[in-house]
Image (cartoon, rainbow, N blue to C red):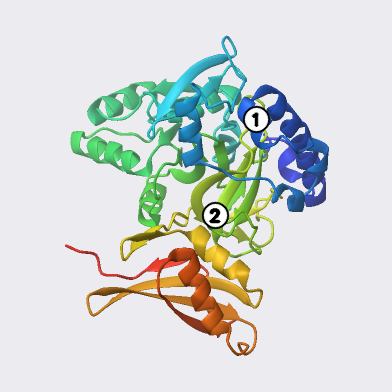
Amino acid sequence: MSKHYDNLEIRSAEQRETDLFAQLGKQIDHAKSSAPAFTETLANVNGSDINDRAALSQLPLLRKSELIERQQGQPIFGGLSGIAAPQLCQIFASPGPIFEPGSTRPDFWRFARALHAAGFRRGEIVHNCFSYHFTPAGMMFDSGARALGCATVPAGVGQTELQVQTMTHVQPQGYVGTPSFLKLIFDKADEIGAELSCLKKALVSGEYLPPSLRAAMAKRGIAVSQCYATADLGLIAYESEALEGMIIDEGIILEIVRPGTGEPVTEGEVGELVVTSLNPDYPLIRFATGDLSAILPGPSPCGRTNQRIKGWMGRADQTTKIRGMFVHPEQVAAILKRHPELLRGRLVVTRVDEQDAMCLRVEIAGNAPAGLDTAVIQSIRELTKLRSEVEFVATGSLPNDGKVIDDQRPIET
């Protein structure tokens, strides 16, 4: 029995980069020829020129808001996919609304890899408690289980007593679903005196996994791991038996950028996750997820060699309204770019004497040149139409949490 799903997981870092960017060049040219939206946005880009991360970082970001706008103007998928029936086999509708394609391509969302890392194996039965209704989560795990050679119980959510009764009869070895629903199932099993010792593993997603719940399931003999995915991209990262961060999936290129920009951050710095999918049926290029994370140093102890992320660390969209004006992370980035002396910045919003107050705290190496504070204040005024103070701080003193706008005003109750 192989410890790893395939040899892609144990490539050298150098080989992986070579392989990924060879695929990316072809993907960009394919996207331009098959998806009208990319024909437009990448008109002046040749796939062969995008051969490293520096070149990739120069391409425009595709944000979820743009996805919604494009789909409203050009049904069904906003010109971002050229897939059509019969290869197009499902059309999902996620909140937004955002429409996503399902394909006849085996393991379209690449979930077999995460299931394998969680201990699922060929011939086993998986109790799938993700929704099969409108959103793709249920089918994501279903197709991954099928690719792995597992049978599924398409249970969906709700009806906990029926869930327990079915599991008692079918005896599945594994569960996939949210962690909170796993707890509800066992609460119901305990209530009615049912025994679910058949379950030995669980792969959860969609919400926070409390360490206390993982420990409680371990006491029942169930190893719980988690993965991170989105409806648009499929699998992004997953835990292995090492339980040290989440390993990036082999079918994507992941960047972490400074919120409000497309500029990559240094390793370990918290920023926004940007993903380029190598899926030819839905070739999302530099898709900004809006989620925050950071790269962990070094490889996983499990032997998989791809980079790892810390997992989900919050949302990157920190837009806030100050004195009736919206201020966006992009505006803070523009202020910093105007002044080469400035490094990282953080706009702190407070309330003083019942009025909103702003202070841009910025890291700077050494002492600030004379007049820099006045110049920065002027830039803030020009770019946000608001008055602000500025405070220069030492390099490395701002928290590494991905925040560009820190709204500290008390919440009205």
At a point 60% along the width and 87% down the height, the residue shown is 368
Q: Position of residue 310 (x, y in %)?
A: 54, 57
Q: Position of residue 253 (x, y in %)?
A: 67, 44
- In this rendering, the count of numbered labels is 2
Res 230 seen here = yes
Contact between marks 1 and 2 (CB within 8 A): the answer is no
Spot the residue most to the left: 413
Name which quarter of the figure residue 42 lies in: top right
208 w.r.t. 408: above or below? above
Q: Is residue 67 above or below residue 288?
A: above
- Left or right? Give the position of 2 relative to 242: right
10 Å neighbourhood of mark 2: few (<14), some, or many (≥20)? many
Check disc 1 and report the residue beneath it: 279
Secondary element at image label 1: loop
Nearer to me, 269 or 117 = 269
Q: The N terminus lies in which quarter of the figure?
A: top right
Q: Which mark is residue 272?
A: 2
Sooner in the amino-acid sequence: mark 1 or mark 2: 2
Q: Residues within 10 Å of mark 1 (few under 14, many from 20)?
A: some
Cα–Cα span, label 1 and label 2: 21 Å
Residue type pointed to by label 2: Glu
In front of the other: 406 or 104: 406
The residue at the point 55 percent across, 47 percent down is: 239
Which amino acid does the dot numbered 1 rest on?
A: Asn
Q: Is residue 155 left or right of residue 60?
A: left
